[in-house]
Structures are given as C-alpha cells and as structure tokens.
Image (tube, grey):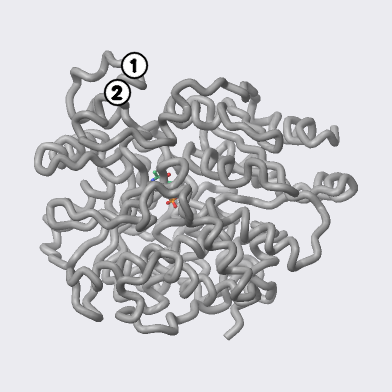
Amino acid sequence: MEVLYSSTRNSGLKITASQAILKGLSDDGGLFVPDHIPALDRPLKELAGRPYRDIAYEVMKLYLTDFTEEELKTCIERAYDSKFDTKEIVPVTEAEGVYYLELFHGSTIAFKDMALSILPHLMITSAKKNHVKNEIVILTATSGDTGKAALAGFAGVEGTKIIVFYPKNGVSPIQEKQMVTQKGSNTYVVGIRGNFDDAQNGVKAIFNDRQLAGEMEAAGLQFSSANSINIGRLVPQIVYYVYAYAQLLHDGKISDGEKINVVVPTGNFGNILAAFYAKNMGVPIGKLICASNENKVLYDFFTTGKYDRNREFVLTSSPSMDILISSNLERLIYRIAGDDAGKNTQLMESLSKAGSYEITEQMKVQLSDFYGGYASEEETAKRIKEMYENTGYIIDTHTAVASAVYRKYVAKTGDKTVTVIASTASPFKFSRSVMHAIDGKYDTMSDFELVDELSEIGKVPVPGAIEEIRTAPVVHDHVCDKTEMKTVVKRFLGID
Ligand SMILES: *Cc1c(COP(=O)(O)O)cnc(C)c1O
C-alpha cells in the first residue's frame, strides 16, 4: 500500500516519499510523517540471518513506496558497502548479558553514518524522479557527528553542495578535526559562536526564509536538509532495530515473538523514534528506554508530561546529546495528539514562544511504551570504567549514558527482558573522556597518544577514520556569530 507523507503542522498535505526527502522540512515548519506506519510484510523469523542489505530493502520499501525496486536496491548497495569496516554492517556484541548494537562501523565511526551514507543516494534519486534541475544545497546544524557524516556522504556528489554549522566550543577536538579537514570543493564548514540549539535555530530560520528561497531559485539552487528531521534519515534508522531482532532470533538468544527492550542514548530523538516505528511495524519491542545525559529535558518530559527548555545548558562528555530542543519529538507529539496538526502546532508554538509546553492526560497515557532515564557525568564515567574492568569492552560516553540508565532501570523495576542498547559511537571518537573515565593517569596524554593507548588496552585496532585525520591539513577555518549565518551561506553560494 502506498505511503504518503503529511506535515505535523498540516495533516491535509500529502506528498510522496521522494518529495519529502527532497524538501526535508515542510513549508509550514512541520516535519514530514508517514500517513500510516506500515506493517512488516514478512515474518521476522524469515528475516533471521539475512544480510543487512536485504533487511534494509524489506524495511525501506514499505516507506519509500514511490521508489522502484531497482532504485532502492541501488541506493542500498551504494550505501552499505566497504565504507563499513565489518561485513555485518552492525555487529551485535554481548557484554554483561546485554546486547550492544554497534552502529559505529561506518566512515565516521558514529551512528549517523547509518542514515547519512544512504541519504545522498536517496536524495539524488528523488531529484531525478521529480525532474529537479536545481543544484541541491544541503544545510545542516550539527552537534558533532552529523556534520562529518553528512560531509562524508555528500562530498564530491555531483549536483550537490553541503554547508555545515557547528558550535565552535561544543564538539570534541577529534570531531572538529574530522570536519575541518573535509575535502571536496562542494563542502563548507563553519564554527558558530553559540551552542547547538543556536546553530539549529539559525538553520531553521534560513530554511523558512522565503525571500532567500526566491534568490536561490533564480540562481538554480534549492535547499534540502540532511538533519535528522529528514524522513530519508529516519527510515534507514528503522532498519537496524529490525535487523537486531532478526539477528538475536537467528543466534537463538530469543524465541520468535519474545519481547526485547531497547535503550537509546538520546539527543534529537531521531534514533529512538526509529525504534518506536520499528515497534509499530510489528517488531516485538517492550520498553523504549530513552536515556539522557545531564541535559535531561526528555527525562523530565516523560516523567511529568511537561517539556521545558528553560534551563541551563550543560556541556557534557556526551556532546552529541547536549540538546535542549529535541526536534524529532514533534513527530511523536503529533502522533499522540491523534495526528492532530492543530494541536501539535499549538504546542510547538508554545515551545518557540515560552520555551515549554504541557501535554494532556490523554496524550500522556499513550507514552506508556517509553521510559525516561538520565545519567550524571559521574555515573557515565563510572559505567565506562566498570564495563572495562568487568569485561575488557570499552564503550563510548554516549553508549555509557545508555548503559548507566539501563542499570538504574533494572535496579528499579527488576525487568529481566532481553535488552538491546544502541551503541552510537566508537570510543575512539571520544577517547579523551573515555580514557579519563578509565584512569586519570591518561589525562596528560595528547589526543593521538590517547587513541594509541585506547587501542592497546582495549585490544582493538585504531579505526581508519581516525588514522586518516592524524596528519590531514585543516581546510576550513571559518567562524561566525549566530546572527551572521545567512550572510555566510549567501557568500558561499555566490548570491550575496
Ligand atoms: C546523534 C547522536 C546521538 C543522539 O541521537 P538522536 O537521534 O539525536 O537522539 C547519540 N549518540 C551519538 C554518538 C550521536 O552521534
């Protein structure tokens, strides 16, 4: 059955998947949502043991219904290939009786690669299908990982340009080095004096700037978004939850139909929303455990029903989760409002004006699949150290937030359900915080000494993505104020 996409702020709108991928964000400021969540059309036990790419096709074909089989399979083959450093694409590693779904084996060693290695191909295919002649300009705000993953995905892709904004003092040194060394004449990287939300708000404002859109059109250009709000990001993320279940089934770790819990270290709410979609497609998922760091807006939301961004922004050791506005939550809000765009718009307006909103009791009841938890900086560091000492397995700071939240959840509820934790980054990407957590004696080492030491004590080779930037020259050194973002964009595009 065909799936069309509506906006969370206009349920009357119906566009195709390829149109939604091209646009990124709806003109009304809303996010695109499928008009229904399709059910898996094959039993999970049939998918057990099947390669990642096959499962990717089985899941994505149900959402991208205007793509031909050949188009979609070509996109999948181009994305999930030797860019990944393991044949499995997403290995499932058992530690302390819990399954870590390693989403960090792509070209930038973080989970954003899962979607961003396929998005450029989905986008170019979408452009062709819709007879778009304009050059596509990807505009992205990043808290670190999206930026590099998007740059790596789009660099050198004909018919596209990519501009990435990141908070100058809000990403790790390695994340920054990864971005500012990005090659490709169609790439542009800018640090802003502000935090991630400033960068994201600036990008949203540029997207909604009608006058600028007109100037772009006249110059044969049009914007699209690689941010996690793009439906072309969300759909590929559903795949690995289906894959994880199929894999556990194949390995005899669960029986057919047995429920699993899923824990996701959460920032913008994209990854956990994909797990929610997987559940609604028929994957037997019990609890969706939403793990936050000290920026615990989502924990507060799930415990009280009130979303309130009016609080101090904390810089933590899990910077990709340092977010006070979780954009993808809007898709969940729309759904629990009964696909009521008016109600959702009202709440989102309250968020933008007052910085907060509160959902009704009726909406709250529908959140029972979710459990919100958070971990302090201290708990996160302790978890990394304990895990290393117990098992020798080294997890990154984001994964450690999830692992710590999971331990607290079990202590509180006694829930023994088989559990999958989304492991969102390689520890090499956050080696300073990870090594500090294991032992303070590493603090005096340089970034690359830490990388080598981590490889030594964890008995894992240094990933290619890190080796690459050891000596790479810095090619982007632009910094601007948050008020200057539009000017910077126009200058880069040559329309100032
Ligand atoms: C982006 C990111 C997250 C948060 O994912 P969301 O989809 O934004 O919730 C968690 N961990 C890492 C390493 C990330 O890069």
Residue at position x 46%, y 50% in the image: 82
Task: Identify the mark at residue 109; answer none if there is no mark.
Answer: none
In the picture as drawn, the residue positioned furthest to the right comes out as 218
**The C terminus, quarter of image:** top right
**Kind of residue sitting beneath label 1:** Ser
Task: Identify the mark at residue 450; answer none if there is no mark.
Answer: 2
Give the image location of residue 475, x and y in percent. 62, 23
Give the image location of residue 10, x and y in percent. 66, 70
Question: Cα distance, mark 2 to mark 1?
Answer: 6 Å
Q: Tell me if label 2 and label 1 are in contact, CB under 8 Å.
A: yes
Give the image location of residue 494, x and y in percent. 83, 34
Q: In this figure, which residue is indicated by the disc labeled 1?
A: 446
Res. 276 image quadrant: bottom left
Res. 45 image quadrant: bottom left
Residue at position x 37%, y 52% in the image: 103
Res. 432 in view: yes
Badge count: 2
Q: Is residue 292 left or right of residue 273?
A: left
Sort mark 1 into few (<14), some (14-19) or many (20+) by Cα contacts within 10 Å: few
**Kind of residue sitting beneath label 2:** Leu
The residue at label 2 has a CB less than 8 Å from ligand 1:
no
Residue at position x 15%, y 42% in the image: 387
Name above or below for residue 429 compared with residue 364: above
Give the image location of residue 208, x and y in percent. 72, 50
Q: Secondary structure at mark 2?
A: helix
Res. 345 in view: no
In the picture as drawn, the residue positioned furthest to the top comes out as 444
The residue at label 1 has a CB less than 8 Å from ligand 1:
no
